[in-house]
Image (spheres, coloured by chain):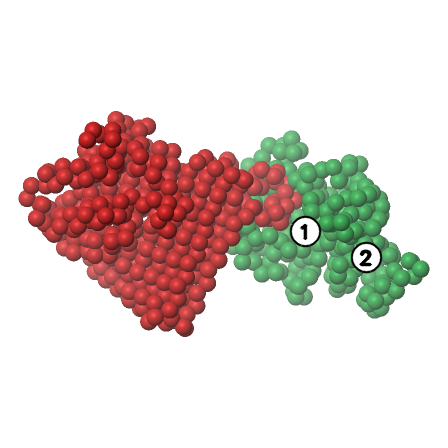
Amino acid sequence: MLTINNLQASVEGKEILKGISLDIKAGEVHAIMGPNGSGKSTLASILAGREDYEITGGSVEFQGKDLLEMAPEERANEGVFLAFQYPVEIPGVSNTNFLRAAVNEKRKYQGLEPLESKDFLKMMRERMKIVEMDQAMVSRSVNEGFSGGEKKRNEIFQMAMLEPSLAVLDETDSGLDIDALKIVANGVNQLRSPERSFVVITHYQRLLDHIVPDYVHVLYKGRIVKSGGKELALELEEKGYDWVKELDVEEVA
Amino acid sequence: MSASTMTLQEKLHLDFGLFEQQLNGQSKSSVHQIRKAAMERFAVLGFPTIRHEEWKYTNIMPIVAHEFHALPTATHITATDVDSFRISGFSGSLVVVENGLFRADLSIIHPQEGVEVLSFADAIAKQHSALEHFSAHAKFDHEALLALNTAFARDGVVVQVARNVSAEQPIHVMYINDARAQNVMSNPRALVVVNESAQVTVIETFHTIGTERSWFNLGFEAVVAPNAVLSHDRLQDDKAQTTITTSTSVAQDRDSKYHSVCVALQGGLVRNNLSSALKGKGGHADFIGLYMPTGKTLIDNHTVVDHAVAHCTSNELYKGILDERGTGVFNGKIFVRKDAQKTQAYQSNRNILLSNTATINTKPQLEIFADDVKCSHGATSGQLDETSLFYLRARGIGKEKARALLLYAFAEEIVQQCANAALQAHIEHRVAELLHQEQELLTDSDND
């Protein structure tokens, strides 16, 4: 599904990613953990195509295609989805219209006709249930005046509508209380399938109690310093990020 | 002196003389005494040049260099012309003002007890009580174009709503200049009196027929009595040879509300002077505006909120999207007088510049003489927010479409505040058109 090979990236001359390699197969859930400033969100942004970063080396292949060559909208239409850490408010554009535009752009890309209005609305009503969205939320402007939890739920709802092959969740749990976290995690779990892969980026182990990963990678100072199974998250929780910092020192030494 | 060497100011003097000759018995009326005083004042002030502080960025001299007919007749436009300017879905009363003159035959006024809609000329002939407010609030001493409008206030519209009456129908005043045969300057006058606890919505639009130059110099004066509400939507969306200058003066009494939405899309030059004086406690004014100059269009909004007494609130938000060689000017004055304690006054001006040749001149100007107030102002100008753009692109929406969608959303924050839904839908459609946006994205009809 996704092969990242020795990816290096910098912003304004400062090296953020110093050679990341990851191989993610269809249906797998990979968690990427790490302290603040380790490069987690940079990785997510680069996968989605944010242009603020300079790729200085390495490659990213998505379903056999060079992902880094594609514009953000192309990546989305190819099946990459980024759930934003800070979803953007778009006053004046209702969620419904926003999603209709997004869904139909993807269909156009795939050579399909736009969805009939009633089919679109039917699909929307079904998918709303996944993250317990109500009609009022969907009718409102995109994320405008939404609480933190509502914004994150809306991200997962959008994911449900766009049916990506690869979903990157950038700190989707940050700032959520436990009830909101459960709704979001439950939504993600319903969307897990053998054809869909996830990259779950998080600062906190708690999320991984609810979205159980197949693999856990620890990112520190732009490198993956340790990889393992889901038990690595627990170990990390126990020992804290200082332990990771020691790992990094060992590796450098 | 031949016409070709005469300045416009000189010609206006001659025209004023002709106007007076036509007055017969009315030349002694109190309204005409005011008109005469206004003409004298205009003679002293002259047209404002860019040396005038309030006209620094808006040069009307190239327009003034042309000859205009200031006493055009109004007999040429037809019902078909009017139909082409109607707002789709609008079902309220329609007032047609051709070349500054009220066209009763083309107007459609839904009668309602307590709601008077009549021509300004009729009001003068009948010595209508509303005329006691004529020029009482719209002070022309330092305003040349208001003085000019007042001097040439031949006709226009008077709206008066009686105490405790809520006008069921909004009133659409359609100003049409017929510039098929000659350059036309019209000086329509609107006087709106909303009595105690009454309520009314007035909509204004401007349209030019023909290809010669067209100048609307509007004077709009309103009195909002205690506990009354005046909603005022204005759309300026005309041709490149059109000049629109407006002077709006509102006097608000206690617990009154004035809600102004002013949208300027296209035209040659647009200058709006909008001011409200909050003269009674508990008054509230909303000044909401949008301007989208492209081509060589210049749109200038000068606003004044005058907090004269305590416990009043005002909220001002003007937004601009400027493209090509379009120019925007925003000047927002807020006065908080010494006695105006507990005032809350907010002002914001936000601009998006889409080209390197577009210009915005923005100047907030707060003068606060009271000490216990909450006031804020802010002005921004810049490009589209990259993070928002990326968000849309990450959802598969192409760059151009994403830009258009964001700009539409930026404008919509203003447009959705229109008092009249039909006008709002019309403006939304126009904004989408100007942004080359697909209308399908904007319809919310499926959300029911």
List the residue tagged with mark 2: A221
- Label 1 marks a residue whose chain is A
Residue A55, x across and y down, in percent: 77, 44
Q: Would you call the spot at circle 2 few (<14 residues within 10 Å), some (14-19), or many (20 or more)?
A: some
- Specify the quadrant of the image occupied by residue A226: bottom right
- Compared with A76, B132 (above or below) is below
- Mark whose residue sits in front, 1 or 2: 2
Q: Is residue A213 left or right of residue B112?
A: right
List the residue tagged with mark 1: A83
Residue A63, x across and y down, in percent: 78, 38
Q: Tell me, what hue is chain A?
A: green
| Residue type (three-letter) at the residue carrying disc 1 | Ala
Seen at 27% across and 32% down, the residue is B67
Q: Tell me, what hue is chain B?
A: red
Seen at 62% across and 49% down, the residue is B387
Q: Residue B445 shows which numbered tag?
A: none
Residue B206, x across and y down, in percent: 32, 39
How many numbered marks are there?
A: 2
Disc 1 is placed on an element classified as strand
Seen at 81% across and 54% down, the residue is A222
- Label 2 marks a residue whose chain is A
Which tag, 1 or 2, sits closer to the chain's start?
Answer: 1
Instruction: Out of B222 and B17, give the one closest to the viewer.
Output: B17
Name of the residue lying farthest toward the top: B181
Instruction: Out of B411 and B105, give the one closest to the viewer.
Output: B411
